[in-house]
Amino acid sequence: MIKVENIKKSFGKVEVLQGISCNFLPGKTNLIIGRSGAGKTVLLKILVGLFTPTAGKVWYNDTDFFQLNKAQRRAIRMDVGMLFQGSALFDSLTVEQNIRFPLDMFTNKTKKEKLMRVNDCLARVNLDGSNDKFPSEISGGMQKRVGIARSIVLEPKYLFCDEPNSGLDPKTSIVIDELIKSITIENNITTVINTHDMNSVMEIGDNIALLYKGELVWQGNKDEVLDTDNQILQDFIFASPFLQRLRSAALAK
Amino acid sequence: MYWKETMRQMNDIGIGSLVIVGIISIFIGAVTAVQFSYQLQGGFIPDYYIGYIVRDSTIIEMAPTITCLVLAGKVGSNMAAEIGGMRQKEHIDAMEIMGVNTAAYLILPKLIAAVVVIPMLVFLAAFVSIIGGYLASVPTGIITDTDYVRGLRSFFDSYNIFMMFVKAVVFAFLLTSISCYQGYYVKGGSIELGQASTQAVVLSDILILFADYLIALLLTS
């Protein structure tokens, strides 16, 4: 489990996060949602240690992450996988080399064992046989799937996804969502997803935290979204008249 | 992984720079020989001094300094752009989150490779430069083959070779560390990446020249 305690973050005089406290649960897809500029990415980068908070604590189980030295943080990061918004695949390496990179860095496996693990991961994301392609030769959705494969190759306990559906068509988005959800359940991973994709919220939102202007204004799950009387959440989720009509119809049923 | 990356860098820096270093060196030797022969015309200094002057000026100054100034432009800007590009495309963040010590993984192999390979390139530059001097002065009739070789063999002091290698190692360290630093800490977009690359070359060149002066002071006093 990841526990966040009163996290604050300022850039100069701008206070981006104003005391966020929440829990991210294992075996669940935990979503951080909010409008652009709400502080989602900053919170996610604090969770993985790319930003240091101005105040507050991040607990990985019983370990206060920001009290650790660099070497200790690296040890925790071995248990962390991350899918970046732009996939962040190494563009000079093939798909296979990208996924094998963490294995080369941190394991003593033989070439054959590494290849087997890479192929397992590729099969898991339905990209069998794409080993020798370069990131520039595959579609955005495939790049995301390679990113997922790379992030799970070391069997992490924590998986972070920054806008996994951005730039993808609705069908591919659903594939990515389902993939993340099933990997989370299979491996009992604590998955934290930063998104503003409404479909993700309604399909895989086991534990949702809504940020608004740097504050946590609502927390619940996908089933509670429809019934909420939180105006900020309603305005965010059901932003268009079409979605408002859908919600009314669903509530009427 | 570190070993493999170091080997890759050695290949990029060493083999990748052979042609440019060779071309520059041959002209350094040629120009030095021609200009000294012009300055020595009509004087009392024997012709064979041309070989001696080409050899020593090349070994002490031209080969290490000019080669490293050129490499700061070729290799340094490449390093700054490569690491800076990785920073901007979140590759470095991705590695950090995997638990990779990115400074060690991205910079150390480049530093080791440069410190090992650049002195070799400088040695080669000195050798090619002396050949350049020969080609520019002997076939053109400025001096005889015997005089040039006699000059090369006169007043040889192996300490000059030591000085050349000291310079090469220091310059290699400077150009690599400055370029990697500029790339690693780049912020912003493609304009800033271009600026970082330029800054890497300019700073490297300035510090190489400053270090050249310091080493000359320290090792010749």
Image (cartoon, rainbow, N blue to C red):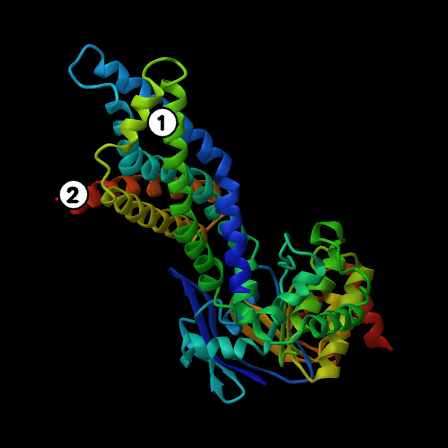
Instruction: Indicate the chain on which mark 1 is placed.
Output: B
* Image position of A116 with respect to B128: above or below: below
Q: Amino acid at mark 1?
A: Gly
On screen, residue A198 versus residue B179, left or right, reads right
Q: Which mark is residue B199?
A: none
Q: Say if residue B178 shows up in the picture.
A: yes
Instruction: Point out the image quarter for the N terminus of chain B.
Output: bottom right
In percent of width and height, residue A196 lies at 67, 64
Q: Which mark is residue B220?
A: 2
Secondary structure under tag 2 reads helix
| Chain-order first, disc 1 or disc 2 | 1
Number of residues whose C-alpha sits closer than 10 Å to that of mark 2, classed few (under 14), some (14–19) or many (20 or more) = few
In percent of width and height, residue B105 lies at 49, 62
Number of residues whose C-alpha sits closer than 10 Å to that of mark 1, classed few (under 14), some (14–19) or many (20 or more) = many
Q: Which residue is mark 1?
A: B29
* Residue occupying image coordinates x 49% and y 75%: A74
Nearest the camera: B148 or B56?
B148
* Image position of B86 with respect to B201: above or below: below
